[in-house]
Image: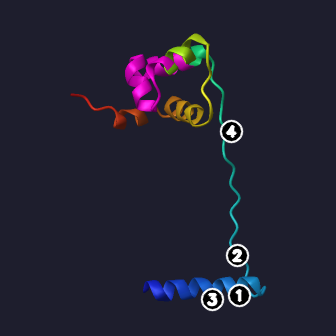
Amino acid sequence: MSVYKSIMQGLDEAVKYQGGKINARKTKIAVKPVESFSSEHIKQIRNRVGLSQVIFASSLGVSKKTVEAWERGRNTPEGPSRRLLQLIRDNPEVIEQYIIKA
């Protein structure tokens, strides 16, 4: 199907839906909540993947001082960092694709 035909088909379906002539497919989704991590839990995640603070920090896109502060309980990760920690905890192999062994 050409791009033009695909666009026209989509527009035709949108008009029919708006006019009540067809029903749209609906999919309900839920997103797991972003978890909070204790200093000990962060250290456990890092140790589980076998990385130093420097390499772990670099792979997360934060400074070594940030990881140090998290692990000592002086600061806590926020937003995207919490989601990344959750992802690494649940799928430790994912971090390997960002590590280049020289």
The CA span between labels 2 and 3 is 13 Å
Label whose residue precedes the other's in the sequence (2 or 1): 1
Up-down relation of residue 67 to residue 23 (above or below): above
Q: Main secondary structure of the magenta part?
A: helix
Q: Secondary structure at mark 2?
A: loop
The x, y position of residue 14, in whole percent, is 67, 82
Q: Which residue is mark 3?
A: 12
Tell me whether the residue at label 4 lies in contact with that at label 3, contact meaning CB atoms closer than 8 angstroms: no
Of 102 and 66, the residue lying toward us: 66
User: Residue type at mark 4?
Assistant: Pro
Picture quadrant where residue 76 is located: top right
Disc 1: CA contacts within 10 A as few (<14), some (14-19) or many (>=20): some
Asked if the magenta segment contains residue 64, the reply would be yes
Q: Which residue is mark 2?
A: 24
**Marking on residue 16:** 1
Of 77 and 23, the residue lying toward us: 77
Q: Which residues are magenta?
A: 42-65
Question: Residue at 59% across / 82% down in the picture?
Answer: 10
Q: Which residue is mark 4?
A: 33
Tell me whether the residue at label 1 lies in contact with that at label 3, contact meaning CB atoms closer than 8 angstroms: yes
Question: Residue at 49% across / 89% down in the picture?
Answer: 5
